[in-house]
Amino acid sequence: MPFLKRAIAALAATTLAVPAAMAQQLPQTPPQADFKAAWSAPEPWRTDRFYLQTSLASVHFHPDDAHDNSQVLINPEWRLDKQWLKGQLLVGAATFDNSYSQATWYAYGGLLWRPVETVQPFYLKLTAGVIHGYRGEYQDKIPMNGSGYAPAIIPSMGYCYNRFCSEVVLFGAAGMMWTVGMTLP
């Protein structure tokens, strides 16, 4: 466990330091006055992208011996050219092993915002959908899972460097995950 705590602390320090260093080195995309103008933005900030990500590490806020921190996430996402509530619409589906090593699926829709116009690589994302896979003795580990399907809302924040992105994803009050992915043309 001490190794895991040191690794998580180093990971957090790196994750927080790298985006600031990259932001100073990258040429910044000029602010977009209109969402549709993003279609003519220089690469890679165009919005017609598929995004594929996987998990690197996860941590539980209240560790339990039953927890498995290797989620093995595979998450394809389509970032649409539509806007709602000033955010870019997206849809996706994820498959992963939950904290109890059970195969789990999450289908969702969501929004992605780039709140700092001068730092386009940084974004906030909020997804909402249905999760399935918590069964047996772990069925009550997520709220409203009576039928085996439960609603889920998952916030995250990310940072991109060229086509590669990394996100910190909160999974409820249980913990967080660090992911890495890439946009596909």
Image: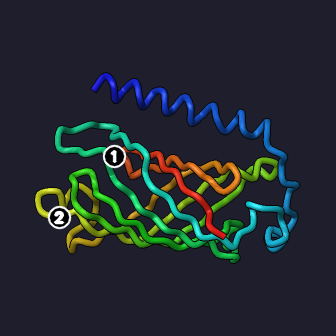
**Three-letter code for the amino acid on which mark 2 is drawn:** Arg
Residue reaching furthest to the left: 137
Residue 3: assigned label? none
Measured from the top left, where is residue 32 in percent x and y?
A: 85, 62
Compared to residue 25, the image places residue 110 above or below, namely below
32 or 162, nearer to the observer: 162
Q: Which residue is mark 1?
A: 174
Q: Which type of secondary structure does the marked residue at label 2 adopt?
A: loop
Q: Which type of secondary structure does the marked residue at label 1 adopt?
A: loop
**Three-letter code for the amino acid on which mark 1 is drawn:** Ala
Measured from the top left, where is residue 118 in percent x and y?
A: 82, 48
Q: Quarter of the image for the N terminus: give it.
A: top left
Left or right: residue 100 versus residue 70 is: left
Left or right: residue 54 versus residue 160 is: left
Q: Residue at x 34, y 29 (%)?
A: 4
Q: Residues within 10 Å of mark 2 (few under 14, many from 20)?
A: some
Measured from the top left, where is residue 161 in percent x and y?
A: 68, 49
Mark 1–mark 2 Cα distance, whole angstroms, equals 17 Å
Q: Which residue is mark 2?
A: 135
Q: Residue at x 60, y 34 (%)?
A: 16
Measured from the top left, where is residue 122 in percent x and y?
A: 68, 49
